[in-house]
Image (tube, helix red, strand yellow):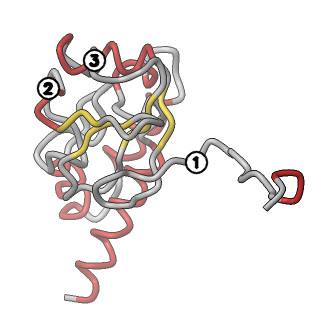
Amino acid sequence: MNKAFVREPDDNGERHCPRCGSLGIAVQHETLVAQLCADALAELGQTAHFCPFAKCEVAYFDAFERVVLVAGFKQPVYPKDPDAPLCPCFGLTADDIAADLAEGTPTRVRAHIAKAKTDAAHCATCSPTGQSCVPHVQQYYLRELTARKTS
């Protein structure tokens, strides 16, 4: 077929994890440098995507489907390690959220959200996605709150 009549696929920048198929989260090079050991960093191009699926062993992947596994992280990160802080900037953990739920008021979560809006937050380098953890903290809190109400 004549190539003039074949539509080229649009490249909107979306990439899916080559192992689990989850939609990746684009990260900047500064995030990769901060999160990965030197050997793991050398496996990827300048830009990559984070695989957000907790049970997938892939941490990051690039457009050429080269992958860095979770073992390439410098330290444990959430959601790949459920015991890691949900917020690596300020150390908010699942235990903190459980304490808020037990007390019946989201004191720690509210304080965390307020801190996350300050210049003290270094999401680009502390977070494995390079983005703020606030939406994930809120989702986690609501999911746990709902689970407690239904059980």
**45 or 135: which is nearer to us?**
45
Picture coordinates of residue 141, whole percent (x, y): 34, 60
Quadrant in which the C terminus is drawn: bottom left
Q: Amino acid at mark 3?
A: Leu
Q: Which residue is mark 3?
A: 41
Q: Is residue 75 above or below residue 144?
A: above
- The residue furthest right is 4
Q: Which residue is mark 1?
A: 14
Residue 62: quarter of image: top left
Q: Which residue is mark 2?
A: 75
**87 or 53: which is nearer to us?**
53
Picture coordinates of residue 147, whole percent (x, y): 26, 79
Which structural element holds mark 2?
loop
Query: Disc 2 versus disc 3: distance between alpha carbons?
Result: 14 Å
Q: Which mark is residue 123?
A: none
Residue 21: quarter of image: bottom left
| Contact? badges 2 and 3 (CB < 8 Å) | no
- The residue furthest bottom is 150
| Contact? badges 1 and 3 (CB < 8 Å) | no
Q: Amino acid at mark 2?
A: Gln
| Contact? badges 2 and 1 (CB < 8 Å) | no
**Mark 2, mark 1: which one is toward the viewer?**
1
Q: Earlier in the sequence, mark 2 or mark 1?
A: 1
Picture coordinates of residue 14, whole percent (x, y): 58, 48
In the image, what residue occupies the spot 42% across and 45% down? 110
**Mark 2, mark 3: which one is toward the viewer?**
3
**47 or 10: which is nearer to us?**
10
Q: Earlier in the sequence, mark 2 or mark 3?
A: 3
In the image, what residue occupies the spot 18% across and 27% down? 73
Q: Amino acid at mark 1?
A: Glu
**9 or 84: which is nearer to us?**
9
